[in-house]
Image (spheres, rainbow, N blue to C red):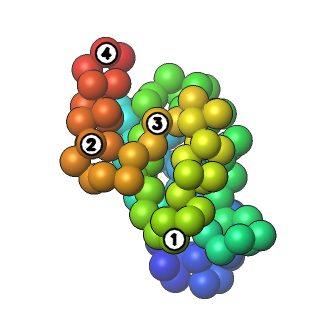
Amino acid sequence: LYPALEKHGHTKTYRTAVEAVMSDPGVDAVYTHLFTPLAGVACFDFDHMAEMSRKHRKPLVVWLQGDASRMPEIARELESRGIPVSDEMSRSARILAALAAGR
């Protein structure tokens, strides 16, 4: 995604990527690795991520890393939209596996 991030910015690039993956009939679930954005910098459209997950009826789980002081705030933003999030890769992978198995 990096070249697209440079050309189009984070928000548009992630919106496009999430929509493309969710729309793919060969994809059953989405696991995404996000870094906490800088305070006041909008990088991700969490509403769109949640909308795509609901629209396509596919689980979406976030592995979140980055600035520890911002992680609780970002996690609350995601969870308030029904998007499971963890700061541990293995835990978020287990969450995704459980959700995908129950699809």
Q: Could you tell me which residue is drawn at 30 percent across and 52 percent down?
A: 88
Say which residue label 2 marks: 91
Callout 3: SS: loop
**How many numbered badges does the structure rendering display?**
4
Q: Quadrant of the C terminus?
A: top left
Of the two numbered discs 2 and 1 in the rendering, the one whose residue sits closer to the viewer: 1
Q: Which mark is residue 102?
A: 4
Give, as a three-letter code, the residue at label 1: Asp
Callout 2: SS: helix
Q: Which quadrant of the structure image shows residue 33?
A: bottom left
Q: Which mark is residue 59?
A: none
Mark 1 neighbour density, 10 Å: few (under 14) some (14–19) many (20 or more): few
Say which residue label 3 marks: 84
Q: Could you tell me which residue is drawn at 31 percent across and 15 percent down?
A: 102
- Please tell me which of labels 3 and 2 falls first in the chain: 3
- Please tell me which of labels 2 and 4 falls first in the chain: 2
Say which residue label 1 marks: 67
- Please tell me which of labels 1 and 4 falls first in the chain: 1
Where 6 sits versus 65, above or below?
below
